[in-house]
Image (cartoon, rainbow, N blue to C red):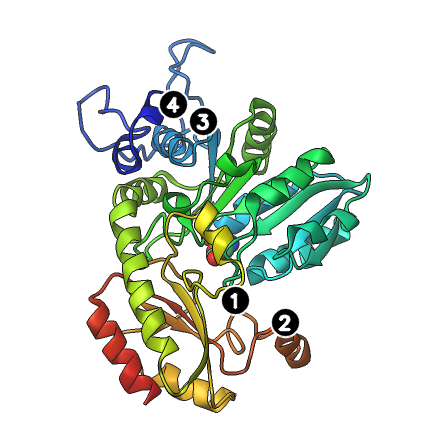
């Protein structure tokens, strides 16, 4: 692919996008159509029906493949629809090994939707990749990795996991939502399949729900495309266009997310009322060396625990911020604050939650791209 020759910022703006062939429009049009006229049966321009193909989606898929250093990309109506399509590659009896600190919706689809179809999921800690091998057997087909993880910002060594998987003929999937393709490219470290909730950093403006899968090999692409077309969880052209536009500023936004993330993390670390701060960029993060190896920056996702470790103290902070908006989701230009214990992870029994390191007062931040001084001032007055 010609775009592989360009540097990352240039690729983000130009990859996959050609001027519109009929008008020369520099921006890919939103092809708001359900079907395409044929001159005679079978005599068409490569487009027959919009569940199967849409030119706006094609442009986005080409862009995504290029920026993840893959060969093929497939777009879906949400991140969960992308995950759903990947698991449909499996059959009853197959087994999946999954990192245990995981997006709640992924845990839910594995345990509540797919477990009843006879697919077995093993949730295990992967901060030490050597831990994985003992769970591999003849039925193991996939290893599912999320890194950095949500909300504890653990880091998993993609290269080490992929090497173990390859040795056993197992495929590695990486949920790359938190890092985005700008900070981390799992295919370069040996992963076979990358997925994103494009709702987050790729879209970047909290205005669209979208998902995608990127692969290198033709066979997996063909099987996923069959599933995409057969099951039909495709995004509309307008949503594809919003992601395509979001991607054009990914590098500029991510640079600022990283810069602001570092400033906020270092502020929190010295705050007298803060017990612990989770951020990938700290030199004393247990897997900082791996983060430095596989990531180009440390992002704007931060979690922290209060010294006064109870729900009420956390709720007081959540109610008091003026810039940080209390909301689920992440990765948008505006800063968000959330409370895993009562929001995203509220359905996990308290004892199990605490055992997994999710304290009552754990607060998660998606640091946006406002001025860092204002964000720090907002947290200072809210923590008190
Ligand atoms: C949000 C999210 C998902 C799910 O994506 P949707 O677009 O909300 O369906 C999957 N993985 C991670 C890490 C996420 O943050």
Q: To which residue does mark 4 refer?
A: 36
- The answer to whether residue 171 of the structure is visible from this angle is no
Say which mark, if any, is on residue 152: 1
Q: Are marks 4 and 3 in contact (CB under 8 Å)?
A: yes
- What's the distance in space between the residues labelled 3 and 2, CA to CA? 47 Å
- Pick whichever of labels 4 and 1 is earlier in the sequence: 4
Q: To which residue does mark 2 refer?
A: 356
- Pick whichever of labels 4 and 3 is earlier in the sequence: 4
- What's the distance in space between the residues labelled 4 and 3, CA to CA? 6 Å
Q: Quadrant of the N terminus?
A: top left
Element marked by disc 3: loop
Q: Nearest the camera: 253 or 238?
A: 253
Question: Total marks drawn?
Answer: 4
Residue drawn at (53%, 63%) of the image: 286
Say which mark, if any, is on residue 49: 3
**Disc 2 CB within 8 Å of nearest ligand 1 atom:** no
Residue 247 horizontal/vertical position (percent):
31, 42
- Pick whichever of labels 2 and 1 is earlier in the sequence: 1
Q: Are marks 3 and 2 in contact (CB under 8 Å)?
A: no
Q: Quadrant of the C terminus?
A: bottom left
In front: label 4 or label 2: 2
């Amino acid at each position: 692919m010609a775009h592989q020759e360009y540097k990352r910022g240039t690729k983000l703006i130009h990859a996959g996008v050609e001027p519109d062939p009929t008008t020369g429009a520099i921006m890919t049009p939103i092809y708001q159509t359900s079907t395409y006229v044929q001159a005679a049966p079978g005599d068409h321009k490569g487009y027959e029906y919009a569940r199967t193909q849409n030119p706006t989606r094609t442009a986005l898929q080409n862009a995504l493949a290029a920026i993840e250093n893959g060969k093929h990309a497939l777009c879906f109506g949400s991140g969960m629809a992308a995950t759903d399509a990947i698991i449909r590659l499996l059959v009853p009896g197959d087994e999946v090994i999954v990192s245990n600190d995981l997006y709640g919706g992924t845990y839910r689809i594995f345990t509540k939707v797919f477990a009843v179809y006879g697919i077995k999921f093993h949730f295990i800690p992967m901060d030490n990749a050597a831990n994985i091998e003992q769970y591999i057997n003849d039925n193991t087909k996939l290893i599912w990795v999320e890194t950095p993880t949500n909300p504890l910002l653990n880091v998993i060594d993609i290269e080490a996991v992929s090497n173990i998987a390859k040795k056993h003929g197992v495929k590695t999937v990486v949920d790359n939502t938190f890092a985005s393709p700008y900070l981390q490219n799992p295919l370069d470290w040996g992963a076979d399949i990358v997925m994103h909730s494009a709702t987050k950093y790729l879209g970047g403006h909290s205005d669209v729900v979208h998902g995608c899968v990127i692969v290198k090999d033709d066979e997996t692409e063909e099987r996923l495309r069959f599933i995409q077309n057969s099951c039909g969880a495709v995004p509309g052209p307008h949503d594809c266009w919003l992601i395509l536009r979001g991607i054009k500023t990914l590098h500029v936004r991510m640079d600022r997310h990283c810069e602001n993330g570092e400033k906020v993390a270092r502020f929190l670390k010295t705050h007298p009322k803060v017990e612990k701060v989770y951020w990938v960029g700290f030199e004393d993060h247990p897997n900082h060396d791996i983060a430095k190896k596989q990531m180009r920056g440390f992002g704007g996702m931060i979690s922290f625990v209060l010294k006064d470790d109870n729900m009420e103290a956390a709720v007081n902070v959540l109610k008091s911020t003026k810039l940080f908006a209390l909301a689920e989701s992440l990765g948008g230009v505006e800063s968000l604050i959330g409370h895993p214990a009562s929001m995203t992870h509220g359905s996990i029994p308290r004892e199990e939650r605490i055992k997994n390191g999710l304290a009552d007062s754990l607060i998660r931040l998606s640091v946006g791209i406002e001025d860092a001084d204002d964000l720090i001032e907002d947290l200072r007055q809210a923590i008190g």
